[in-house]
Image (cartoon, rainbow, N blue to C red):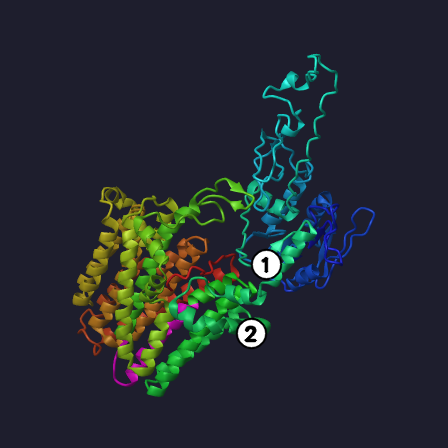
Amino acid sequence: MIVTGSELLASGTPAGPGRSPHGTAAGTAGGRADGWTAGATTGVMAGSAPVAPLAPALAADLAALGFHRVLRAHDLDQLAALTGAWLTAADGPADPADRVAVVDAGFVGHRHALRLALTDPRFPAAAVPGAVVVAGAQARAALAAAASRLTTPPLLPRQPGTYEPGPYQPGPYEPGTYLPGPRHARPYQPGPREVVPRQSTPRHALPRDAGPQQGAERHRAPVGPAGARTSVAPFPEAPARPQPQPAPLPLPDLLAGALAQQYGIPVQRPELGTLVATVPATECELDVARAAMAEVDEEEVRLRRAVKARDGFFATFFVSPYSRYLARWCARRGLSPNQVTTASLVVALLAAACAATGTRPGGIAAGVLLLLSFVLDCADGQLARYALRYSTVGAWLDATFDRVKEYAFYAGLALGAARTGDHVWALALAAMTLMTFRHSVDFAFMAADQTAAKALPAGPTSAAGPAGPGAAGTPGPRNTSPTAEFSSRLDRVGWTVWARRIIVLPIGERWALIALLTACTTPRTALTVLLAGCALACCYTTAGRVLRSVNRRRPRSVRAAAEVATLADGGPLAELLAPVLRPVARRLPALAPPVLAALAAVALPLAVRLSAGTWTAVAAAGGYALVSALVLARRLDGALDWLAPAFFRAGEYLTVLALVLRLDVAALPAAFGLVAAVAYHHYDTVYRLRGGTGAPARWLVRATGGQEGRALLATSVAALAYTGSPVGHQGAGAAVTQGALVALAAVLALVVVAESIRFWVLGDATAEHDESGDTA
């Protein structure tokens, strides 16, 4: 932590007119809880006189946020020397997770305002008025370079009528201030707070008898009584008023602007709301800031911000009102979000085990435990937002465990029904297929709709951060279709917002429905109602996305098409056939990819249901692979091409379901395990794309066979197993098929889970924390 310049005196007033306008504190807080030197505070002399200690309130805030080593720099030159030497020194922050903060010594504000800027690990740089922080080698080097660059020319306020060097724009907190840059002169434009002196003589400087003519006539001697002019001295002009000069920006704000403009580092500026963060220059401003701080309950604001801004109806009104206090309880006891996420998984697995008993008390216990698991699932994200303890592993665990918990509960229902003689494994597998299809629609649509904004080059920026849609760090417009505009208008009508969020059946409503039905009805009823509700929600969301895409006005980017193709999960067969089929694919009409994918997803399960265990089904699977290669041979940037991955997902899963329904219903648990392993691979691909880490490695896609390869493999194994054997679970073919499905599920699960753990836990991966409130 580096601190430069003056600070608040013991009396609580600024140091007066001589106070340095760039008083700054800067420091480090690493991935370790105690910063880089546990409990160490270093003072740096300014010139020949010692620098006074920090104000107690600011010192306490910095220490509470983990910045234990504090250095002081009295002026900009000293700051540049400190950052340049310190960041390259042997005892400097070598860990990429270490954060270097620059805070104005006169900063006044809430501790949580500093926490939002200085401790959020998701961003390479962040800033609030009077404070800026950087993390990572690139951002730290940019900070040192920016501090060195700001030393020349000297930081002085602009004078009216002068020229200003560089492409800098006025900062976000004080329009019309000086910001240095390259030596490219451009005419000065007065800021909104500057008064440009008039060039004409002030009115009050004219004699009383002065007419409209000015110039020499102004000083003509007055005429006496006889017409003779008398000799008098000219009327003296009033001295010009001193022009008000705008106060320079605090140095952290200048550094934040330089990071964004000159070095391309996206600077996150958290929304403060009612929180206060400012650098008062006068006693009056200080009193105003402290009065504003006194009016805000900081802890209440922190609790309110811990709740996801856009969440489902059940989570908002039935869980979040008390789960946020559970999150605070966990934070005060040192529990991490990952520990709460793991506890949620354990509770959900216990719920599945209770459901597997097949008894009424077991069903009631399962429903209660499932709701408790959802409360913990909400609390882990609220804990991460409350304490700003985000992590890549945490985002991956939260997203992955949600799917594991839900599908494990489906299996528990099926096991419980089997104990009572009711076989509902087909319903459980159908429910998992429908949920995966729905999520594939959502994820593919988001990839096609939003990636264009991410892929746009960074546009002109200002000190407030990147400007314009598509700039780094700024989300571009999600969609520009009339349907999207109509949806935005509906969002302004309160009751329609909650009605639409209930209709889409997000995870909170879905789990509440499952828990209620499990406690009060049978597993068959629970799964049947769940299938009907999810089918309705899927139709509603898919229809809305189709309308948005058909009316879309903005073209999709190359990156969007690449991500949609990645989600389609084409394997080695499609990779080999695509170059051969590309000339044919280019001649197909615009709607050919989704139409062909839909036809293939319907035709193959039907063919397998009618002829599984024969080579006719294998031929149908071969045709399915050919159609897959044809679809993937062209760039998937059409209006509805994003539907192709979801259709392929449904085609593969339904093929496995049709296979075991035709040959041996006793193999349904093995088929459920196989589809679960493949679904994990597909979800993992989605999370990698959403985190910006790119598609999975090609060796992983080839090793898993791709969706067309797995469909061909399953039908071929069944054909080989049932050659000369009757259809049904009595013959030898049933045992071979069931064993093959179990082995295939085990191998796929081992490969994809091991690679996923290696990638997320041991690799240099990033993950997107879900703050959107979209359906999960």
Amino acid at the residue labelled 2: Trp
Q: Is residue 398 left or right of residue 96?
A: left
Can residue 641 be seen here? The reply is no
Q: Identify the disc placed on residue 113.
A: 1
Which image quarter: residue 407?
A: bottom left
Kindly identify the residue that appears in the image at 32 percent across and 50 percent down: 575
User: Which residue is labeled 2 in the image?
Assistant: 329
Which image quarter: residue 507?
A: bottom left
Cα distance in 3D space between marks 2 and 1: 21 Å
Kindly identify the residue that appears in the image at 75 percent across and 16 percent down: 231
Magenta region? 401-425
The quarter of the picture where the N terminus appears is: bottom right
Kindly identify the residue that appears in the image at 39 percent across and 58 percent down: 686
Instruction: Assess disc 2: are there few (<14), some (14-19) or many (≥20) residues with their C-alpha within 10 Å of its C-alpha.
Output: few
Q: Give the camera-side residue of 318 and 72.
A: 318
Which residue of the protein is positioned furthest toward the right in this rendering?
48
The quarter of the picture where the C terminus appears is: bottom left
At mark 1, the secondary structure is helix
Our reading of the magenta stretch's main secondary structure is: helix
Amino acid at the residue labelled 1: Ala
Q: Is residue 75 left or right of residue 696?
A: right
